[in-house]
Image (spheres, rainbow, N blue to C red):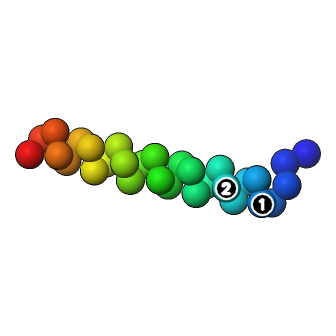
């Protein structure tokens, strides 16, 4: 069973990764 805290942490990690990848791509294209 995955607790709500662990699930929320996973979502936060995904958001952080998505922000980093988007920012990295923008910098590369620039």
Q: Residue at x 8, y 46 (%)?
A: 30
* x, y percent for residue 27: 17, 46
Q: Which residue is mark 2?
A: 9
Labels 1 & 2 near each other (Cβ < 8 A): yes
Q: Which mark is residue 17?
A: none
Q: Residue at x 80, y 60 (%)?
A: 4
Q: Which secondary structure lies at badge 2? A: helix
Where on the picture, by quarter, is residue 3? bottom right
* x, y percent for residue 14: 54, 49
* x, y percent for residue 7: 73, 54
Q: Is residue 2 left or right of residue 28?
A: right
- Disc 1 to disc 2, C-alpha distance: 6 Å
Q: How many marks?
A: 2
Q: Which mark is residue 5?
A: 1
Q: Is residue 29 left or right of residue 18?
A: left
Q: Residue at x 76, y 53 (%)?
A: 6
Where on the picture, by quarter, is residue 24? top left
Q: Residue at x 38, y 53 (%)?
A: 19
Neighbours of disc 1 within 10 Å: few (<14), some (14-19), many (20+): few
Q: Which secondary structure lies at badge 1? A: helix
């Amino acid at each position: 069973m995955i607790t709500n805290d662990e699930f929320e942490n996973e979502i936060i990690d995904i958001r952080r990764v998505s922000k980093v990848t988007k920012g990295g791509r923008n910098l590369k294209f620039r």
